[in-house]
Image: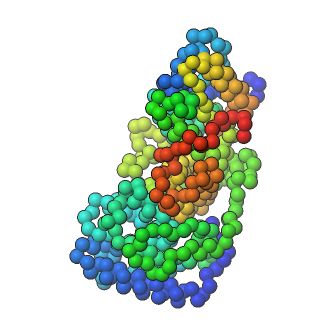
Amino acid sequence: MFHAIRTPGRMRDQLKDMQTRLREIAAAFLERPDALFFIGWEMTPDEKETRPFFARNPRQAQRLVWNDLCHPNPASYLPRLRDREGMIGVAVKGCDARALRELIRANQIERKNLFVLGIPCTGLVDPNTGAIASRCAECQYPVDFDYDETLGPMETPALTVERSAPDLDAMSLQQRRAFWKQELDKCIRCDACRKICYGCYCPECIFEMSDPKWATNRGDLADKIFYHAVRAYHLAGRCVGCDECARACPMGVRLDLLNRSLRDHAKEMFSFDGAGITDEKPLLRTFSTEDPDPFFGGDE
Amino acid sequence: MSDFEPKILIFACNWCSYAGADMAGVSRYQMPPNCRIIRVMCSARVRPEQVISALTQGLDAVLVLGCHPGDCHYTEGNYLTRRRGIMLKNLLETMGFEKNRFQVNWVSAAEGARFAQVVSEFVEEIKALGPSHVSRDKDTGTHA
């Protein structure tokens, strides 16, 4: 999932300046009487990674960081905070902004209760290798959102148009089958991919239902195909392409490929550009009488 | 695989396709015995989970039948089915299912002959494909 491009060293200083301003803006926001907290990132105790952080007062705002390790999406905490009274500050990079826009469109959070700080992102890196994440290298999306404040012009870096391997569409059926058998064999059904996703906010998840009991936990291939097919399908037309599912996976399953393929097909079949970019109705809640007709069998 | 008898699930909408099945029966058309029909109020009522669940629990194929586009009893249900069906079919293909294992088709209440034809052709296609790779894994005990 990571490209072999490294962040130029000079970028680090630029990010330091942005971090200072992030702390100032967050502290100023937290001075407001109606402010609940400001969601951003802090360093983990070992200083190797970042983790989400809720700053509750101006002093805590000094723990906030911005650097090229800020992978977690702060906006993904908002649906469960929707009933809190008061203002919530949130720092978002481009992909987080798309997720936030999608959450607002889906009525999961109200815009008026948010203070949104946009951070121009120049690509995040893998904490172990320093290579730029492929989601960032391939990021082609506009970062269109009505921010309350930004740390600079919000632009998409567009580092490469090359796609990370493997290309499932180019594979034969047998190869795809073998590929998924190998990938899904690694899966331990820990639900990390589901927990990390900004879009998984159903109060009762289908995988936790006991009546009807949709999902079992036998751990065989059929069970895992069900889990991952349903998980991916539930995000059809809502996935913003942040690849957090694949990053969160402790076993390194290439879950990003499933969602990428759904986004590709949505674009190809329905000219649907991707979630969080427009305020159109969601892909699967609308239709056109001009949609391709699915006489699925022979004619393709 | 000529002696292979697939197990096939059909979701038929109450207003068109299920009545079409009835018509096919009343008109005494010959139909293969491989299908189990579930009547649903609308083809859009079929959840993708139900299709995926059927395919991973050992059924060889799933067919969703609804009213012809424009004729839906609920005005737009089958248009939604169409869009969802295309996305689901593509996802299943990406995950290694043959593209014909899941199909959507339209049969009206008057089309008994068409119902018999669509179902017979579908069963023939699935017979040619052989058992689903998921159920094959199960039978031979080679699953992880």
Q: Is residue A176 above or below residue A138?
A: above
Q: Is residue A178 above or below residue B49?
A: below
Residue for point 27% across, 63% down:
A84
Residue for point 40% across, 51% down:
A202
Q: Is residue A83 above or below residue A53?
A: above
Query: Foreground: B116 or B59?
Result: B116
How many numbered discs sit on the rendered protein? 0
Answer left or right for A219 relative to B34: left
Q: Tell me the quarter of the image containing the N terminus of chain A.
A: bottom right
Residue B15, position in %: x, y? 49, 24
Residue A66, position in %: x, y? 46, 80
Q: Tell me the quarter of the image containing the C terminus of chain A.
A: top right
Query: Foreground: A226 or A79?
Result: A79
Q: Which quadrant of the figure has residue A263?
A: bottom right
**Residue B137 in sight here:** no
Q: Residue furthest left?
A: A33
Residue for point 44% across, 62% down:
A101
Q: Which quadrant of the figure has residue A2?
A: bottom right
Q: Which quadrant of the figure has residue B24?
A: top right
**Residue B134 in sight here:** yes
Query: Foreground: B95 or B80?
Result: B80
Question: What colouring method underlies this structural image?
Answer: rainbow
Residue B88, position in %: x, y? 58, 43
Residue A243, position in %: x, y? 55, 63
Residue for point 56% across, 66% down:
A141
